[in-house]
Image (tube, coloured by chain):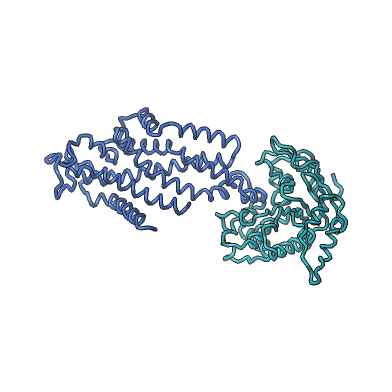
């Protein structure tokens, strides 16, 4: 493991740990309003100051990080499972099933991802409770983000279907779901893990995109997207540099993910 | 159909959009016999093996003709019934031992899966069957060995594990498709002796497919020569080696490497093959 990857791992672990300790580090919570000090600069009480309605920015960054870091892996899990089901099964079955799945996946991949995400989210109710908005965002990301992974998995499953050990298993009398779950799926696991990890930074960024457009997690729940949206009203970076913390955090986390994953790709190559 | 044969095949096999790979191939195997099928790469040997097992579906090949096995036509058989035969009455050992074992599974799991495909006994029954199969192929049946993955086995050990899987249910016919081609000469000799012993002890018939004439000569009672999708010659091994009739068989015999003896003369077997 090289130094950059070690550093990236440490950064990711530190960000996760700090966000998990939000209840302890920012006991005031993300929604409490300090109406006497709206839009205040950093102070001892409010490390990153307060927003326009007096909410503690530091608390909102911590809770927002927690939501984004939970939301993205959860969505990645849904999309990877869906990809395993569509791609893995189609590749394993081969023939017409593979052709149908490949065509469907290609169609999905040809649609601009962000446009699709925004269009689907806009079709769904926007005036919903914060919890519902989290669930909707999570499901949209998960349900729309499976295509690229499915493409990789169908190719891998197709190659496994034609492997000697699957032929040997068939010659032993194995067939159907048992053959898929016992002999094919365990060999897809490394690819599933890789697709899961690769999807996380994509979904973090996608959630941030939805959030900036006001289509992500609903107020008062914070997420990186909704925190970045607050930058709309920023007049001067020089006067209020602390307001850039969510953006810096997003860049740091995505870069760290990229470093960790690119190193993995080098190792597997 | 009952002429005393365990397997009697007369088949034509074609892949989509291509001329037939096998053209009216006729093959008969008697119970307890080791039959050799010899031919060069691409002659259709593996296609015949897969046709017998009904495993040509994934290549979308069509099989015409009849393959009688234990008085049942395998070509006309439903897939469900064929599955009941695969691994139980008909089994297969492939060429590449390490590629034929699932890299993600332990040896025990692979044997267990092969056993469970045709048996509903208890875990103890399964363990006993696995131990018996491992012992029959001269492999340790201890926990340490059974916990290994394919990558932790030598090629010879992997081939023995495959053979153990193939003989778990004491099949009537074992098809060894180039089962010794990927092995070094010493391991090859051990595996050949193993096939011969299993045949002697269990009465199991073996269709030994190979392009390697010396190994075929070592264990097969009869051989059939497959050339460009047709059986050009078949008969007792000694007869074929002593007096090959077809030009292709003669070419095969003459292509055997000539190892010099101490006197510089070819060995007796090579001399016979060279006739």
Q: Is residue A159 above or below residue A108?
A: below
Q: Is residue B223 visible?
A: yes
Instruction: Determine whether B220 is above or below A171 in the image.
Output: below
**Is B74 located above or below residue B236 in the figure?**
above
Residue A244's image quarter? Answer: top left
Quadrant (top left/top right/bottom left/bottom right) for the C terminus of chain B: bottom right
Quarter occupied by residue B141: bottom right
Q: In terms of depth relative to the viewer, which is nearer, B19 or B135?
A: B19
Q: Which chain is cyan?
A: B
Is residue A238 shown left or right of residue B196? left
> In the image, A138: left or right of B194?
left
The residue shown at (37%, 27%) is A123
Residue B38, position as x, y percentages in the image: 77, 52
Question: Residue A263 at x, y = what percent?
Answer: 41, 52
In the rendered image, the residue lying farthest to the left is: A36
- Classify the position of the N terminus of chain B by image quarter: top right
- The residue nearer to you, when weighing B107 against A117, is A117
Chain A drawn in what color? blue
Horizontal arrangement in the rendering, residue A159 relative to residue B71 (left or right): left
Q: Residue at x 28, y 49 (%)?
A: A19
Q: Is residue A249 above or below residue B183?
A: above
Mark yes or no: residue B29 visible: no
Depth check, front residue: B10 or A52 = B10
Q: In x, y percent, where is residue A209?
A: 32, 36
> Residue A252: x, y in percent?
30, 48
For the view shown, which residue lies furthest in the bottom direction?
B262
């Amino acid at each position: 493991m090289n130094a950059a990857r070690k550093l990236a791992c440490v950064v990711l672990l530190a960000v996760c740990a700090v966000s998990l300790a939000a209840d302890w580090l920012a006991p005031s919570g993300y929604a409490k309003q300090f109406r006497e000090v709206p839009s205040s600069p950093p102070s001892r009480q409010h490390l990153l100051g307060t927003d326009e309605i007096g909410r503690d920015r530091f608390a909102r960054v911590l809770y927002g990080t927690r939501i984004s870091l939970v939301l993205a892996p959860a969505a990645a899990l849904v999309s990877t499972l869906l990809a395993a089901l569509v791609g893995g099964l189609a590749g394993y079955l081969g023939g017409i099933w593979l052709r149908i799945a490949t065509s469907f996946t290609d169609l999905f991949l040809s649609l601009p991802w962000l446009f699709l995400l925004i269009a689907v989210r806009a079709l769904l109710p926007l005036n919903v409770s914060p919890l519902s908005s989290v669930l909707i965002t999570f499901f949209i990301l998960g349900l729309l983000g499976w295509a690229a992974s499915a493409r990789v998995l169908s190719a891998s499953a197709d190659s496994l279907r034609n492997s000697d050990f699957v032929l040997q298993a068939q010659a032993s009398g194995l067939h159907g779901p048992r053959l898929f779950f016992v002999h094919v799926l365990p060999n897809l696991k490394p690819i599933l893990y890789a697709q899961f990890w690769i999807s996380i930074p994509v979904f973090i960024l996608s959630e941030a995109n939805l959030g900036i457009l006001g289509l992500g997690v609903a107020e008062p729940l914070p997420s990186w997207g909704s925190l970045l949206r607050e930058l709309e009203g920023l007049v001067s970076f020089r006067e209020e540099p602390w307001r850039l913390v969510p953006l810096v955090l997003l860049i740091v986390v995505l870069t760290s993910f990229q470093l960790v994953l690119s190193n993995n790709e080098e190792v597997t190559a | 159909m009952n002429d005393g044969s365990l397997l009697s095949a007369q088949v034509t096999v074609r892949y989509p959009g291509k001329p037939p790979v096998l053209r009216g191939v006729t093959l008969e195997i008697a119970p307890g016999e080791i039959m050799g099928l010899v031919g060069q790469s691409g002659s259709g040997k593996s296609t015949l093996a897969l046709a017998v097992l009904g495993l040509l579906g994934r290549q979308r090949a069509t099989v015409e003709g009849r393959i009688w096995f234990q008085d049942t036509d395998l070509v006309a058989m439903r897939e469900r019934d064929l599955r009941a035969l695969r691994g139980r009455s008909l089994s297969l050992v492939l060429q590449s031992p390490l590629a034929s074992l699932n890299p993600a599974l332990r040896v025990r799991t692979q044997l267990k899966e092969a056993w469970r495909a045709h048996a509903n006994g208890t875990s103890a029954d399964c363990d006993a069957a696995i131990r018996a199969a491992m012992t029959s192929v001269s492999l340790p049946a201890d926990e340490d060995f059974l916990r290994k993955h394919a990558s932790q086995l030598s090629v010879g050990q992997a081939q023995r594990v495959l053979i153990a899987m193939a003989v778990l249910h004491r099949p009537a016919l074992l098809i060894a498709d180039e089962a010794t081609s990927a092995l070094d000469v010493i391991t090859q000799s051990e595996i050949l002796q193993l096939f011969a012993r299993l045949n002697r002890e269990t009465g199991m018939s073996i269709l030994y497919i190979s392009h390697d004439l010396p190994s075929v000569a070592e264990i097969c009672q009869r051989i059939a020569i497959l050339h460009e999708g047709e059986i050009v010659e078949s008969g007792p091994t000694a007869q074929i080696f002593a007096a090959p009739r077809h030009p292709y068989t003669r070419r095969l015999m003459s292509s055997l490497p000539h190892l010099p003896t101490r006197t510089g003369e070819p060995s007796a077997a090579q001399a016979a093959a060279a006739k």
